[in-house]
Image (cartoon, rainbow, N blue to C red):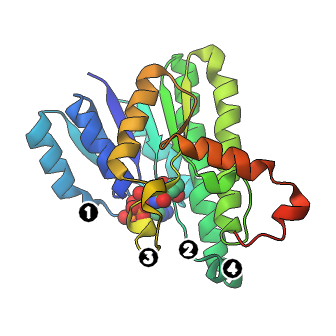
Amino acid sequence: MSTILILGATSDMGIAIARLFAAKQFDIQLAARDTSKLSYLQTDITIRNNVRCSIHQFDAVDFTSHQTFFNTLSPKPDITVCVFGYMNDNAKVTDDLNEMLKTMHTNYTGAVSILNIASKYYAFSKKGCIVGISSVAGERGRQSNYIYGSAKAGFTAYLSGLRNALHESGVHVVTVLPGFVYTKMTEHLRLPQLLTAHPNDVALSIYNAVQKKKNIIYVKWFWRWIMCTIKLIPEPIFKRMKL
Ligand SMILES: NC(=O)c1ccc[n+]([C@@H]2O[C@H](COP(=O)([O-])OP(=O)(O)OC[C@H]3O[C@@H](n4cnc5c(N)ncnc54)[C@H](OP(=O)(O)O)[C@@H]3O)[C@@H](O)[C@H]2O)c1
């Protein structure tokens, strides 16, 4: 039986990923900073799927705890999914250094810190899979969320380099660019229904990407073309746009 580690397991996407992989008979390791939020999910997954489901304390911004956190996982996961993230209103983030650092450290530094540790283990084992949930916000900086977007851009670049570095070791790295998704993170926003996915769509896309060894996935296919178009807009025009 294979084991999947979900970092940020209290997130709506993390819950959907845990439920889907458990239904596919994976053992599940749920990791979050507030483990009390995970008890119901653990019980439910165990009863429904007859798989092992464990709970682990993990804080993305407590960088120095990451090595010990990974060392104590038993068994080591075959797949590590980095789901956690943080987004606040861009104006609040640019006005408050703590919010700025929290945005950068949660979405970039924390993700790189823990995945660097997991990737060294996978490179040594010559197998394994890393899934990173980044964002289309990282594909071109926009005035409405460029602090979050720049952290995700860094994370996307990190995953790209990691995929390149680990290819010869047989380790697979998936970059997930979900587009809009209905979750707690976006519940205050009015999202266009056609362009917005559900957490279950994200989970299914990730499962398929892992099985088919895909590298970069957009959950709804048209986001690839939306972002392609946005990236083609010449900078003199782009800088005048209200995006
Ligand atoms: N929703 C979208 O439209 C969208 C689009 C593109 C990408 N994404 C990305 O998708 C991922 C999942 O987000 P979501 O939409 O499912 O939002 P969500 O439900 O708000 O989940 C965010 C998760 O991050 C966790 N987290 C925040 N800071 C943490 C820390 N220091 N240590 C550990 N966990 C921490 C939160 O844990 P707590 O329960 O402890 O707060 C929560 O589980 C994020 O990386 C997000 O950036 C979302």
Mark 1 Cα shell of 10 Å, populated few (<14), some (14-19), many (≥20):
few
State which mark lies toward you, 4 or 2: 2
State which mark lies toward you, 2 or 3: 3
Report the amino acid beneath label 2: Asn
Q: Real-space Cα distance between discs 1 and 4? A: 29 Å
Tell me which residue sits at (48%, 44%) in the image.
220
Residue 88's tag is 2
Residue 240, picture quadrant: bottom right
Front residue of 189 and 70: 189
Q: Is 187 drawn above or below residue 228 in the view shown?
A: below
The reply to whether discs 2 and 3 touch (Cβ–Cβ < 8 Å) is no
Q: Earlier in the sequence, mark 1 or mark 2?
A: 1
The reply to whether discs 3 and 1 touch (Cβ–Cβ < 8 Å) is no
Q: Earlier in the sequence, mark 1 or mark 4?
A: 1
Report the amino acid beneath label 3: His
Label 4 belongs to which residue?
Answer: 97
Q: Residue furthest left?
A: 47
Under circle 3, the secondary element is loop
Tell me which residue sits at (58%, 54%) in the image.
110
Front residue of 105 and 243: 243
In the image, residue 55 lies at what x, y percent?
Answer: 27, 49
Tell me which residue sits at (73%, 55%) in the image.
140
Q: Real-space Cα distance between discs 1 and 2? A: 22 Å
Q: Is residue 233 visible?
A: yes
